[in-house]
Amino acid sequence: MKASQKPFNIKLSLFILAMTIIVMIFSINRIMINQLRDEARSQAEILAKSYSDAINSSNEEDIRFVMDILLPSMNFPILITSKDEISAGLNLGFSAQEGSDEYNSQAWVMVKKMDQFFPPLDLVWDDVKWGEIHYSDPQVVTRLRWMPYIEVGFGIVFILITLWGMQLIRRSEKNLIYAGMARETAHQLGTPVSSLMGWVKLLREEKEDHGIILNSMNQDISRLSEISERFSKIGSKPKLKGIVVLELISEVSEYMRDRLPKQSEIEINYSGDSNISIQGDWVLIRWAVENLMKNAVDAMGSKSGDISIILTQTEAGTQLDMSDTGKGIPRSDWKNIFRPGFSTKKSGWGLGLSLSMRIVQDIHKGRLQIRESTMNKGTIFEIIL
């Protein structure tokens, strides 16, 4: 799949999901409204039958039960008409006094509206129709009709606020990444460029053997080429090849030993099966391991200490454990240290470990995490590929 298609597919999936949720909200609302309407219709039918039976029986107790108990228990608008007269009304919400011309006028208008949605129920006495019961939806149904629109509206507002917040966070992270990448690039290029400038100066002054100078310049040029290759591969999909992991660890260890301060007493040791190999990109994995080792050196500072790398083959894959005897990482920062821009060092840019995380997890589909860290005792990073 092309990279340009992924954002489109994600947006399409989110749109389909949103439409599905909206349809479900309206469907559930429709089911609830229909159930309430069915209940209102059943109650109105019971009222009509009870009202007719009470009148036909001429029993005052039956009539009193209908008028005093059954009718007031109804929770929806009801109008009882007899020919051209309004006999009774309930739950109408009229401000006009019952029996007044204004009340009757409003009642007949409501009768017409009621009959548009619910057919009136006949009231019968001696098999002769003498009146009708008109009714409409309970007030809760009217409120429920607007609920989906309110819910969807709140949902849209919430999504817009969330997207706006995510955009701010994303923009902030981008700025941190851009600034960090710029500083990391300057840092990576600074040493070999400064070295080359020094060698050029010595060539002009002819104070050293040209052969030694040229060999050193070749080393610096190779380093610049490696840096260029690193940054070109981190933004693209590299081709994975067979890598003997112990050889890579050996190369990184030698590189770091040569660059430790002269007064440093840090020891770098490694062990493992020399036959263990993986499919990966040598340049990027070397960069990831180098960043972890630099982080370990910084954690120990100028004091003596040990960096130990153990390579093993487990059921989960090829496992690389790198431990140091540095100052340790607080538990609260275990996840933050992999976030771009986060650093516990005053002069740190917070990009080395995040780059290692991207190389291991995003590009090589592995796992990078802190397995253990104790304050003032050290940290163990775990890489599984």
Image (cartoon, helix red, strand yellow):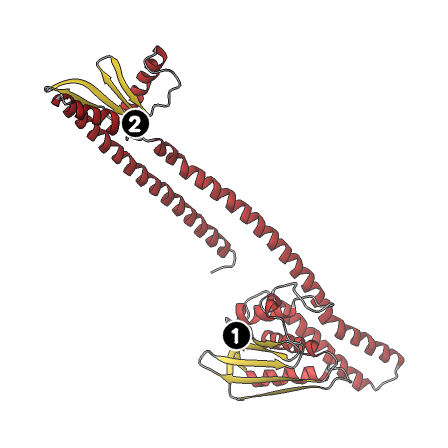
Taking 268 as reference, is 153 left or right?
Answer: left
Foreground pick, 73 / 291: 73
Q: In the rendered structure, are the residues bearing label 2 and label 1 in contact, judged by CB atoms less than 8 Å apart?
A: no
**Mark toward the viewer: 2 or 1:** 2
- Gap between marks 2 and 1 measured at Cα: 72 Å
Residue 75, label in figure: none
Question: Where residue 43 sits in the image (x, y, percent)?
Answer: 23, 32
Q: Which residue is denoted by mark 2 in the rendering?
A: 136
- Amino acid carrying label 2: it is Ser
Name the residue located 48 percent from the left edge and 51 percent from the top edge.
Answer: 11
Name the residue located 70 percent from the left edge and 76 percent from the top edge.
Answer: 298
Q: Which residue is denoted by mark 1 in the rendering?
A: 240
- Tag 2: Cα neighbours inside 10 Å, few (<14), some, or many (≥20)? many
Vertical position of residue 320 compared to residue 127: above or below: below
- Amino acid carrying label 1: it is Leu
Foreground pick, 229 / 146: 146
How many marks the image carries: the answer is: 2
Quarter of the view holding residue 183? bottom right
User: What secondary structure is marked by label 1?
Assistant: loop
Considering every residue shown, the one lying at the far front of the view is 61
User: What secondary structure is marked by label 2?
Assistant: loop
Vertical position of residue 272 compared to residue 192: above or below: below
Name the residue located 71 percent from the left edge and 71 percent from the top edge.
Answer: 188
Name the residue located 72 percent from the left edge and 85 percent from the top edge.
Answer: 304
Question: Where residue 221 sits in the image (x, y, percent)?
Answer: 72, 76
Residue 379 is at least partly visible in this image: yes
- Tag 1: Cα neighbours inside 10 Å, few (<14), some, or many (≥20)? few
Vertical position of residue 82 compared to residue 140: above or below: above
Question: Where residue 207 sits in the image (x, y, percent)?
Answer: 88, 84
Label located before the other in sequence (2 or 1): 2
